[in-house]
Image: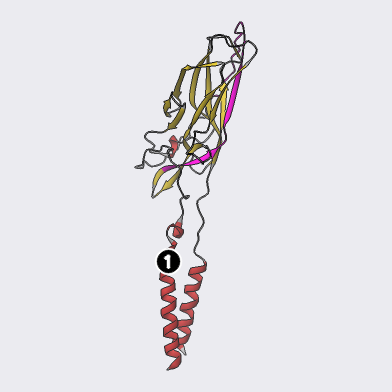
Amino acid sequence: MKQKKTLLVAIITVLLIIFNVNFAYAAEGSASIEIVPNVQNAKEEETVTFTVYLKDIVSELGMGGLQGALNFSEEFDISTVEVKGLNGMLVTYNKTNNYVTLYKDDLTTEDELIKNRTAIMEVSVKVKKGATAGSKATMAVVPQDSEEGQPAKLFVAEAYYREDEIDTRPIETSPATASITVSENGGTIVIPQATPSAKPTATASPLTVNSPKATTQPNNLPQTGISDNPVPVLFGSLIVLLISYVAYRRYKDI
């Protein structure tokens, strides 16, 4: 009788393990893009500088980059475009297709991540000669073209811990647009720009990391805890359950 009770407890324990395996995925964060021009009006052949910000950041660690494309209306001369990374962001810009990628080259602490509204890029471009006075000249950050049959997407690079190292994963976000008015005389009006939030004073311990570049979209979100690889747990549990049942039947027949 004692052996039967022990087997029954073992079976119940295995069942509890099986039904309490956690398959939850780590939650994704989010962020939005804001573009602020340095002027409201500009005449032909005058340079306009757009500052691109990441804001509305929701993430446990923060954001580490952006991947998308720049788009300009016909009032701008795209041959004059110049792009510069801000606040530690490195930038690659392809003038052929206007693709742009921003990233942290050496991300070693959480302190380097973007946690609040922060300027990440400056884009300078000249108003085209002969642009119509009174028209709107627009610059936008938009998705890159995707493979045929796939939707175009715009990504920010969210940071997370993977095996005790900081890595990034691409999180989809919405395009952003800003515009100025073409003026005959310029009449430049400078728009005050917000100062990026100061970085927190506390720093995390240095970590060996991969260079976080948002280049490809992962097939699955990172998992946490026992759910990292639940199949072996389930398989082993089922084997234990089967052995316990066979042993129980044998003892019952004795």
Question: Residue drawn 61% across and 11% down?
Answer: 132
Please state the extent of the stretch shown in magenta in the rendering.
Answer: 167-195
Q: Going by the picture, which residue comes out furthest to the front?
A: 148
**Residue 243 in picture, x, y percent from top left:** 41, 79
Judged left or right of residue 193, residue 205 is left
Q: Could you classify mark 1 by the number of other residues whose Cα lies within 10 Å: few (under 14), some (14-19), or many (20 or more)?
A: some
**Residue 182 in picture, x, y percent from top left:** 61, 12
Element carrying mark 1:
helix
**Residue 148 in picture, x, y percent from top left:** 49, 39
Q: Going by the picture, which residue comes out furthest to the bottom?
A: 254
Quadrant of the image for the C terminus?
A: bottom left
Q: In this figure, which residue is indicated by the disc labeled 1?
A: 233
Does the magenta run of residues contain 178?
yes
Does the magenta run of residues contain 95?
no
Q: Quadrant of residue 6?
A: bottom left
Q: Quadrant of residue 248?
A: bottom left
Q: Going by the picture, which residue comes out furthest to the left?
A: 208
Q: Is residue 184 above or below residue 175?
A: above
Question: Residue drawn 40% across and 65% down?
Answer: 232
Q: Is residue 7 visible?
A: yes
Q: Is residue 117 visible?
A: no
Judged left or right of residue 102, residue 133 is right
Judged left or right of residue 182, residue 118 is left
Q: Is residue 127 above or below residue 72?
A: above
Question: Residue drawn 43% across and 71% down?
Answer: 237
Judged left or right of residue 163, residue 186 is right
**Residue 181 in picture, x, y percent from top left:** 62, 15
Q: How is the image coloured?
A: secondary structure
Q: Amino acid at mark 1?
A: Val
